[in-house]
Image (tube, rainbow, N blue to C red):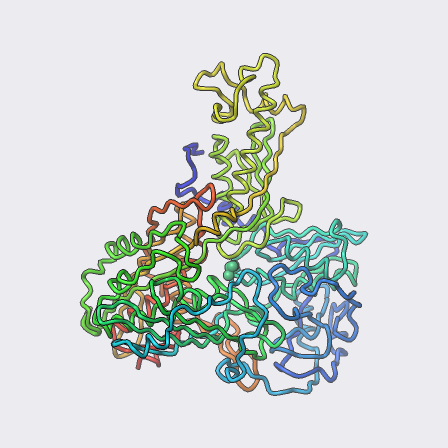
Amino acid sequence: MSNVHPYVGRAEPRVDGALKVTGRAKYAAEFRADDMVYAAAVPATIAKGRIVALDLSRALSAPGVLDILTHENRPEIPESDEPYLNDMVAVPGSPFRPLKDDRIVYGGQAIALVIADTHENARHAASLVAAEYEAETPVVDVAAARGEAYDTFEPRDGIPPPPPPRGDAEAAFEGSAIRLRHDYRVAPEHHNPMEMMATTVVWEGEGRLTIHTKTQGVINPKNYICAVFGLDPDKVIVNSPFVGGAFGMALRPHYDLMLATMAALKLERSVRLVLTRAQMYTMGWRPDTLQTVALSASADGALTSISHHAVQATSRYEDYQEPTVNWSGLLYDCPNVSLKYELAKIDTATPSDMRAPGATLGVYALEAAMDELSYELGIDPLELRLKNYAERDGNDDKPFSSKELKAAYAQGAERFGWSKRSPEPRSMRDGKELVGLGMATGCWEAMMQPHSASATLSADGRLEVACGTADIGTGTYTILSQIAADEFGLDIGDVTARVGDTTLPMAPVEGGSWGAASAGNAVRAACKALKEDLLKHARGLDGSPLSNAAIDHVAFANGRIALGSDESQSVSFADAVRASGQAAVSAKADFAPDEDFSKKFAAYTHSAVFAEVKVDEELGVIRVTRVVSAIAAGKILNLATARSQILGGVVMGIGMALHEETLWDKRLGRVVNANLGEYHVPAHADIQNIDVIFVEEDDKANPLGVKGLGEIGIVGAAAAIANAVFHATGRRVRDLPITIEKLL
Ligand code: MOS
């Protein structure tokens, strides 16, 4: 074991790595119970209308079938006084309730739940459920709905509406020498995590349930399910120790949780429901969005106006919102800014957060437009960004808590070799391929949320830290272990971190890149509280060498609390624990963001992304041969897991630029490529050289100096690639993905 302090800041291997690669890490669909039965959801074959008749006869007589739940026979669900059913990440509107009534509001909506003795029997019987519908014509294209776009919605919690205009963007635009206005569109995307949404409800008897469900935060689905079914929170445990990718899709509870619980309560036995890959396309998605960006500048390249307008798809039943245009008011220094954000209702499930919601789309459009402006001006794209560098957040008129974006530009450009770029489009070649170099800026908010954590030291010298947050694959177990090991000078092997269980201290969902800063600081605070307690016990020992020692004068290392470097002036952890009269000493602490600080400062992470593409002129094939992503995100807790987050973000950016596209049949309103054969994500062969740089950035927003980086890696990546494609080919494609036919 490596006992090299500090662990924080190193490329420490994942503490759960061995569990994952040996299959011992258990996911929601892998828990079982002796009495367990299997459920399968039946999808509607229309996208809008109502169910006229259901014929269950064939399905009911299929082998192994125990029951079929529909809107006609499902158990009564008590009316809840909670309008959002306690879903803390609900959006304004009326949450979707599966099997509520005969209405079909989106394609693939569950119309029945078959329960059988095996997974296979349930799936087979589900295929035998027949439904007769009265179908209406759905609209699934935001462009077709934009005529009814509206901005009169109730704002979603935590999503700031666009700031009021500053200056007069229109007048400045009209009066400027250099100007452009273009429309941009990014295809709708689905998250496509490896792990399906799944719920295993274990019936513990007497109304007690242990629910294993895929989620980015266990406390939210617990509160939700208790509100939906009127359950006693003391009788429900929700557990989700490992998550096989989520990217935002497991923030809100989905119908697998609701239906599996409904079935378990009705049958009074354990039920497992795993959604199919196709059913993963019937829930949250990155919304179809139409954007228009207008920029103007003086001849020297100083921006004179920015206008950014987005119309974003939402469902009929909820006003999903994300911060799409706001970035255009803070990324550059510009006196005249006009931002507008509207929603348009279509007949799909409600969209959802998907990695860097809002920023991924909005910053793409802004950074593509900035690239276009650089050519209009005849100024290097990087120089144009530097020329308009924002030293303050123009939206809130505040200084940044820290902003090392200039260092990110410089180090990224140096590593990438940006200076070797020849400015003219189509001027660089490698054999028969055109070569293009492009760049873009990325930005994401550095957020924090209140979290609680506990720390427990046993007499055998082992430390356990716990927090009800989630490790969605980002490395939470590892960073919490590093932080705790450093606080006590322990070997990381003597530390256990626990997350993903409602019996642990309070945490909201893990999203928005706030996990590391929030759970990390909560664990740090719990360790500090535990150290105080231990010192108190150590002081109380007969003849304690620490009897007068203050916490600031002792060190915790090598299993001892020591005053100075003299061993005789110390008490072992074991003796301190024994002095408590208990087998272990435990402390709890709460972390909350410092509101005074956030009133004074704007906290954001930034990136400078540089991309090289090679384009086969005859075939239109684009290869992303090199990406350098230079990140300014405060203190980096773990260089290995942090790098993985940025790599993953860049890979998703490559997907957005070149591959990913959820396609709805416009007449039927159903997704036609609801599988990984036809929804293209980047494969290994699409990924070449990705280089990640973390620039030094000292931030004071929280004691650890952490800003979070689960999302910043994707922001700007697609724009850098699209800009590189223009540089290679001279073709400006403004609707992503840039598939072959758009280049030919
Ligand atoms: Mo993230 S889209 O907040 O999981």
Residue 471 visible in the shown view:
yes
Residue 192 visible in the shown view:
no
Q: Position of residue 617 (x, y in %)?
A: 25, 77
Q: Position of residue 736 (x, y in %)?
A: 39, 74
Query: Which quarter shows the N terminus?
Result: top left
| Closest to the observer, 744 or 730 | 730
Q: Is residue 609 above or below residue 545?
A: below
Q: Name which residue lies at 56% across and 83% down.
A: 139
| Closest to the observer, 8 or 195 | 8
Relative horizontal placement of residue 84, taking residue 310 as reference (left or right): right
Relative horizontal placement of residue 198, taking residue 675 as reference (left or right): right
Q: Name which residue lies at 25% across and 71% down.
A: 298
Q: Is residue 110 above or below residue 626?
A: below
Q: Name which residue lies at 69% across and 83% down.
A: 50
Numbered circles on residues, count: 0
Query: Which quarter shows the C terminus?
Result: bottom left
Q: Position of residue 203 (x, y in %)?
A: 75, 54
Q: Position of residue 726 (x, y in %)?
A: 28, 73
Q: Is residue 262 above or below residue 737?
A: above
Residue lying farthest to the top in this orientation? 543
* Image quadrant in which you'd find residue 428: bottom left
Q: Is residue 492 above or below residue 563?
A: below
* Image quadrant in which you'd find residue 743: bottom left
Relative horizontal placement of residue 265, taking residue 461 as reference (left or right): right
| Closest to the observer, 682 or 92 | 92
